[in-house]
Image: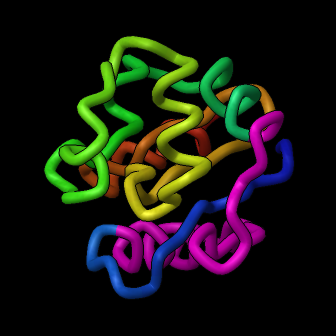
Amino acid sequence: MAALTLLHNPRCSKSREALALLEQAGAEVQVRRYLDDPLDGEELRGLIARLDGKLSDLVRANETEWKSLGADREDESQVVAAILAHPRILQRPILDNGERAVIGRPPEAITSLLES
């Protein structure tokens, strides 16, 4: 199995649930607290390329920071710039195995990477 990285915010209940699911499954996972250790532009573009789902799903559109930007959730360059400036708007949790990345909304969605 490929190495797993969980983009995690310990203050988020869905993120904590996803981590618990991974631990219960016995998965070896590297936890990256993306608010303390934000993704750089190259990492973010790579994540987008691996992401299952739509680009717009990557953004927490209800956050004040996102709303204040007036950016387009369908425009990759605007999404990347917004997340780089405001890492808090990155949706969470995200499980990444280096080939595919899945947003854990609901947390059980991450189990699809455990099966591959």
Judge from the rendering whether residue 57 lies leftward or rightward of residue 112; answer left or right: left
Question: From the image, which quarter does the N terminus lie in?
Answer: top right
Where in the figure is residue 84, as x and y percent of width and height?
A: 61, 48
Where in the figure is residue 15, as x and y percent of width and height?
A: 40, 70
Placement of 90 over or under 70, stated as above or below: below
Using the image as rendered, state which of residue 67 and residue 105 is in the foreground: 67
Q: Quadrant of residue 58?
A: top left
Q: Quadrant of residue 45?
A: top right
Placement of 4 over or under 101, stated as above or below: below
Where in the figure is residue 85, as x and y percent of width and height?
A: 55, 53
Question: What residue is at 62 percent from the left and 61 percent from the top?
Answer: 6
Question: What residue is at 77 percent from the left and 69 percent from the top?
Answer: 30
Q: Which residues are magenta?
A: 15-43
Number of numbered markers: 0
Using the image as rendered, state which of residue 46 and residue 68 is in the foreground: 68
Judge from the rendering whether residue 91 lies leftward or rightward of residue 112; answer left or right: left
Question: What residue is at 45 percent from the left and 85 percent from the top?
Answer: 10
Judge from the rendering whether residue 8 lies leftward or rightward of residue 71; answer left or right: right
Residue at the left extreme, as displayed:
62
Residue at the top extreme, as displayed:
75
Where in the figure is residue 113, as x and y percent of width and height?
A: 59, 39
Is 95 magenta? The answer is: no
Placement of 111 over or under 49, stated as above or below: below
Is 22 magenta? The answer is: yes
